[in-house]
Image (tube, rainbow, N blue to C red):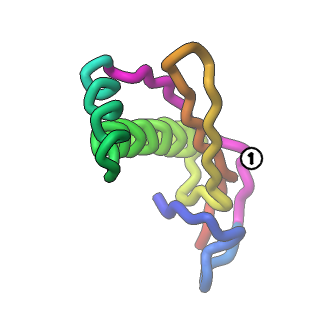
């Protein structure tokens, strides 16, 4: 599966258009990570626990989007974008979407 933020795949022609595909996940913060984040706020630096949580959420949303594209028999997802939203106190959704196509 070709995944790109571009509107096309250089050197390849779009032969089928399947439309929008998407994947999402909702993740809640972990109390232990909140405590460590609070301590990091005092001294500064990267909040590695949250960085890992966000990367895991991105990977899961992409995996779900690819699964949907595969079911449509697409071999590429173009113009991929990400969005986030808060759905509850301490929980956020990460949403990945793009256009499923077949390229040759």
Relative depth, front residue between 63 and 44: 44
Whether the magenta-drawn stretch holds residue 17 is answered as: yes
User: Which type of secondary structure does the marked residue at label 1 adopt?
Assistant: strand
Q: Is residue 103 visible?
A: yes
**In the visual, does 55 lie left or right of 43?**
right
Quadrant of residue 5 in the image? bottom right
- Residue 53, image x and y in percent? 36, 36
Mark 1 = which residue?
19
**Label 1 packing within 10 angstroms: few (<14), some (14-19), many (20+):** few
- Residue 43, image x and y in percent? 29, 46
Q: Main secondary structure of the magenta part?
A: strand
Residue at the (36%, 38%) spot, across then down: 50
Q: Which image quarter is the C terminus in? A: bottom right
Relative depth, front residue between 86 and 13: 86
Whether the magenta-drawn stretch holds residue 94 is answered as: no
Read off the magenta span.
Answer: 15-30
Residue at the (49%, 38%) spot, across then down: 61
């Amino acid at each position: 599966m070709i995944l790109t933020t571009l509107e096309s795949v250089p050197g390849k022609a779009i032969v089928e258009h399947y439309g929008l595909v998407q994947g999402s996940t909702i993740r809640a913060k972990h109390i232990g990570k909140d405590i460590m984040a609070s301590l990091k706020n005092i001294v500064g630096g990267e909040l590695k626990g949250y960085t890992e949580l966000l990367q895991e959420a991105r990977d899961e949303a992409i995996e779900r989007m690819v699964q949907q594209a595969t079911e449509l028999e697409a071999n590429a997802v173009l113009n991929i974008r990400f969005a986030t939203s808060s759905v509850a106190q301490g929980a956020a959704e990460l949403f990945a979407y793009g256009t499923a196509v077949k390229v040759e």
